[in-house]
Image (spheres, rainbow, N blue to C red):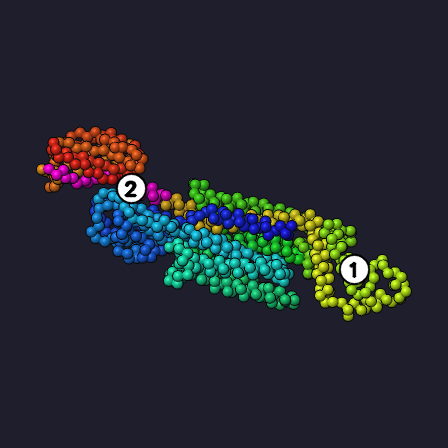
Amino acid sequence: MAARLLPTLLAVLLAGLAVLAGAGSAGAHAALTGSDPQQDSVVEQAPKEVSLTFSEQIAVDEDAIRVLDPAGNRVDTEETPRSLGSGGAQYAVKLRAGLPDGTFTVAYQVVSADSHPVAGAFTFSIGAPSETSAAVPDQASGGGAVGALYGIARYLSYAGFTLLVGGAAFVLACWPRGAGVRPMQRLVAFSWVGLTAATLAMLLLRGPYAGSGKLGDVFDLEVLGGVLETKTGAALVSRLLLLAAAALFVAVLFGAYARREDPKERRDLTFGLAIGGTVVAAGLAATWAMSEHASTGLQAGIAMPVDVLHLLAVAAWLGGLTALLVALYRGPAVERAAVRRFSRVAFGSVVVLALTGLYQSWRQVGSWSALTGTSYGQLLLVKIGLVALLVAVAGLSRRWTGRLGEAPGDTGALGPEGEGASAPNSTEAATDSAPDSGDGERAEVVVATAEASERAEAGRPAAGQGAEAEAGAPGAESAATARVPAQADPAREAQLRRQREAASAATRKKRRDGDPERSGLRRSVLLEAGIAVVVLAVTTVLTTTEPGRTEEEAAAGTSASAAQQQGPVSLTVPFDTGGKDGKGTVLLDVDPGRSGDNALHVYVQDPGKEPLDVPEVKVALTLKAQELGPLAAPLERISEGHWSATGVQIPLAGSWTVAVTVRTSDIDQVTVSKNARIG
C-alpha cells in the first residue's frame, strides 16, 4: 500500500492542477460598468476626455487607459489617469485638441483592488464611424505562459501554507512524538521550501502578470520595483519575512523540542511554540486576506479577519489530515489518542469553516441567482459538494478509529511500527509466533541465510551438521563463538544487520497489512487527502474568479447604461449635392429608437438653419452585422423641409447605418450616411 501512495497522490494532484489550468485567466474582478463616451456611440463633437467606470476600486499607471485614432496613433495626453472620485472606481484621461471625425478605440489595462488584472477595449465615433487600423494587443492580461505559471505558483503557495501550518499544528497539538519522526520533519520542511519558492515566483511574475504578459520582464528590476509599491507586492514581501520567522519555529520544533525529555521543560516549550506559531500562522494568512477578495468590497474590515480564520481552519484540517496520512504510511506507530485529538481538532476546524464560509459566500455571492447563474456561484457549489463528501469520508475514518478502540488487547498504536513504537498487541504477538507466509517466509529465508553465513565466517558448522565434531570437541562452540568478534568483517556485519532490518520490516509490513481495521483507516484517510487536494484546487480557482455579487452588479450597470442609451435617436448629417442651393444639413429623429415600430422625422435645413424645400428625400437603414437591409422608410412630405414616416420596422437592435439621399434639382443628388445605435 505504501508503494502505491505516491502515485495515487500524484494523480490526484495532477487532477487538481487540471482543474486549475482549466479555469484559464478568469481573473477579471473589476468589471467595466460605464464609460463616457459610451461604447459604440457616435458623438457630434470631439470630447475633451474619456472616462471609465468600474465595479470596484482599481489601480492605474500612465498606460492604464489609451485612446487610439483610426490610424492607431495615441490621441490621449499619455498622462496618468486622474481619479473622478467614486471610491477610486472612476478614472479619466484627457484627449488632444483638434481630433478628426472617425472611429476611436479605447483600450484599458488596470489592476482591481483584489489584485487581479483587468483588460479590454471598446470603440466610439466622432461625427461618423470609419474604418480603423488601431491594433489592441491580443495578449490578455493575466493570460498566456505568465498567467499559467502565476496560477501554478498561487496553487503551490496555498498548498505549502496548508501543509506547513497543518503539519506543525498536528505535531504540536496531536502527536508530540512526531517531532522526532523523520517523515514528519520532511513534510513540514518541504512545505516551507515550497511556500517560500512559490512566493518568490509570484513576486517575480507579478509585474508581467499584471502588465505586459512577457516572460522577459520577470527579471526587469524596474518592473519589480513597481510591483513592490503595490499592495500585492507588499503582501508578498511580508510573507517572505514571516517565512523567515517560520523557519526558526520549525527549527525549534524539530530540534530542541524533539530532544526535550523533562516534562516541565517540554510543557513550557510547547506553550511558547503554540503562541509563536499561532502568531506566525495568522500573519501568513493575513498576507492573503490583505491583498485578495477580503480586502475589497462589502464589509472589508470584518471580511479580512474572517478570511484569516477561514485559512487557518483549512490548514488545521487539511494540513493535519495530510500529516496523519504521512504518519500512518511512513512513520512509526501513531497512538490512538493522537488520532482522537486530531479528530477533535478537525471537528472544530469544520465548524469554523462552516461559519466563515457561510459569511464569505453571502458576501461574495449575495443572491440565489448569483449562486446558480454565475461562474463563481457554480464553483462555490462544487466546493460545497466536495467539502460535504470530505466530511462524510472523515466520518468513516472516525468509525474505523472507534473500531480500533474496541479491539481486545489494543494498545492504541496505529500504523507501521518502528523505533519508539508501542508494544504490539496480542494479535500482533500471535502473528510473530505463528509461521509466516509471503513476506514472512521470505524474511525467514533471509534470516536463515544470514545466520548460516555468520556461522561459516566464524568457522562454526551449521545447525544439524558436524555433530561428531561438536561431540569430540567439548566447548568448541563457545570457543568459536568467542572468536567471532575478532575474526568478523565489519562490512559483513553491516550487511547482516541490513538483512535483519529488511526481514524485520517485511514482517512488520505483513502484520500491518493483515490488520483490517488499520488498513481501513489508512484507506479512508488517503481518500480524504485526495479529495482535499481537489478542494484546494477549486479554492484556488475561486480566488481567480469574479465574485458573483460583482458580476451581477456589473451586469446591472451595463443594463442600466444600455437603458440610458435607449430613447429617441437624433442624427445630424451634412450634405452637398454640388449644385445651386445644394448645401445643407439633414436632421433625422428616430422615435422611440428601439427595435419594433418607430416614427421617422427628417428636417432639411439650409446653411442658415432655415427649412430648405427639396424635391425628394429618401432614407434607408442597413444592419451590416446581420446582413439586413437596406430597409427603405416610406417618407411623406409634411411641410417645407419636413418629411416623416410612421410604422418604420426595425427588427433588431444594433449599430445601423442610416443612408439619407437628398435631391435638390433634377440632376443634383447626393447620398450621405451615418451609423447610429438603435435599440
- Kind of residue sitting beneath label 2: Gln
Q: List x then y, in percent, for residue 580.
A: 9, 37
Which mark is in front, 1 or 2? 1
Q: Quadrant of residue 367?
A: top left
Residue at the image point whose x is 53% and y is 53% from the top: 314
Residue at the image point whose x is 48% and y is 58% from the top: 198
Dot 2: within a 10 Å radius of its alpha carbon, few (fewer than 14), some, or many (20 or more) residues? Answer: few
Along the polypeptide, which appears first: circle 1 or circle 2?
Answer: 1
Towards the viewer: 294 or 20: 20
- Count the numbered circles shown: 2
- Magenta stretch: includes residue 570: yes
Residue at the image point whose x is 37% and y is 55% from the top: 212
Q: Mark number for residue 525?
A: none
- Kind of residue sitting beneath label 1: Ala
Left or right: where 613 falls relative to 92:
left
Residue at the image point whose x is 59% and y is 57% from the top: 170
Q: Which residues are magenta?
A: 555-579
Residue at numbered disc 2: 564
Tell me the distance, in whole angstroms, between the alpha carbons under discs 1 and 2. 97 Å
Towards the viewer: 262 or 521: 521
For this orientation, the residue located farthest to the bottom is 486
Q: List x then y, in percent, for residue 653.
A: 30, 36
Q: Quadrant of residue 497?
A: bottom right
Q: Is residue 461 visible?
A: yes
Q: Mark 2: which secondary structure?
A: helix
Q: Is residue 82 above or below residue 367?
A: below
Left or right: where 103 falls relative to 450:
left
Q: List x then y, in percent, for residue 482.
A: 81, 69
Residue at numbered disc 1: 452
Q: Is residue 55 visible?
A: no
